[in-house]
Image (tube, grey):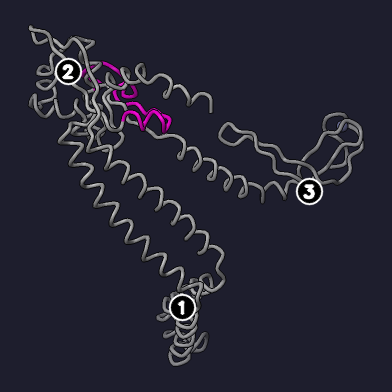
Amino acid sequence: MEKCKECGGRVIEDLVDYKTTILGEEVVIAKVDGYRCLECGYTEIDKNILEGLKIKILDKKLELQKEKIKKFKPLLINNVRRIRESKRIPQKKIGEALGYSEQRFGAIERNDNTPIVSTAILIASTLEVPMEELYGVRYVTKTFYDKIENLTAIEVKNENGEVIEIKFEVIPELVEINKEFHALEEELDKKMEKLRQLKRTDPHYRDIKDTEKEIRELKKNKKKDKNDGKIGLTEKEKKALIKKKQDRIARFKKSPSVVDIIEREAEIKRLKKEKNNVLKKKREIENKGNCILKQSQCIDGHIFNLLKEKYAEEYNTMYEQ
Ligand SMILES: [Zn+2]
């Protein structure tokens, strides 16, 4: 760059800040090679540097996304029942149109059964609404999620059997198991993050991975070398080389830092198994108590709207963040 793009003034090479927006947040990457206008102050990043920055930006994006996921939980809102009732179509009629029994269709409405995409499209067209209206995704705050995850909905009916109110009650058993489940989730997250970091930075572990890759490449080329004796290693040389590399791996596997990584891997495996066991128990309690959240994330649209009102404060905090 010889002249400023903005004012045509003289530019010099300088370290400048690079500003960009990632997931709606402004991020500044400070002091990278670029140009600065001496007259108007306009700055620009060197083109080659910008290429390298793309990777850095991608890393930052992933990091922010992870933070976002930590703060919010996605919910799948099932609006099938809400839409059907608003259109005053009996459950039976839709079932007939789809060729389903009332029971099977009822299971879809209650979130006991999530339909495959083609079925969902069919339901949407039968109800004459776009697909996005039938099943929607909402990110809710953790505080809101904590409020609703242990609830069951109880319909209060009048003497004609019409629902006049929906009451929410806590399933006590679920409170306990969810506490246990989230503690395990958190512990696992922390341990896995630490392990990833160790694996990235430990030179011995990296060396083992690189050597394992070299062995795989050597083995892959086996056939090719056999046909062409002149180039490459002979079978004997290759075997010896593989052996040497395997010895190197065995040696490094004994180093304290790698032993530590292997132990951590085993611990994580054990925790994952424990988490699965708790999850199984959790699902049993959820089904028995008719929990409003199915599979931890599906919820009926009408129930969701009621809870949004009931816990408006917890729901609305997400807009402050
Ligand atoms: Zn300028």
Q: Is residue 66 left or right of residue 140?
A: right
Residue position marked by numbered label 3 in the rendering: 33
Expressed as whole percent of the image width and height from the top left, the position of residue 165 reads 21, 12
Residue position marked by numbered label 2 in the rendering: 155
Q: Secondary structure at mark 1?
A: helix
Answer whether labels 3 and 2 touch (C-beta < 8 Å).
Answer: no
Q: Which residues are magenta?
A: 124-148
Expressed as whole percent of the image width and height from the top left, the position of residue 259 reads 45, 74
Look at discs 3 and 1 and give the one toward the viewer: 1
Residue position marked by numbered label 1 in the rendering: 253
Expressed as whole percent of the image width and height from the top left, the position of residue 292 reads 24, 29
Indicate whether 144 appears above or below 3. Answer: above
Give the amino acid at mark 3.
Asp
Expressed as whole percent of the image width and height from the top left, the position of residue 119 reads 21, 30
Look at discs 2 and 1 and give the one toward the viewer: 2
Q: Nearer the viewer, residue 99 or 134?
A: 134
Q: Nearer the viewer, residue 76 or 261?
A: 261
Question: Could you say which quadrant of the image residue 173 lies in?
Answer: top left
Residue at the spot x=41%, y=33% of the render?
A: 142
Count of numbered badges drawn on the protein? 3
Is residue 12 found inside the magenta-colored segment of the image? no
Tell me how far mark 3 sits from mark 2, CA to CA: 65 Å
Tell me how far mark 2 sits from mark 1, CA to CA: 61 Å
Is residue 132 found inside the magenta-colored segment of the image? yes
Indicate whether 271 appears above or below 230. Answer: above
Tell me how far mark 3 sits from mark 1, CA to CA: 42 Å
Residue at the spot x=50%, y=64% of the render?
A: 199
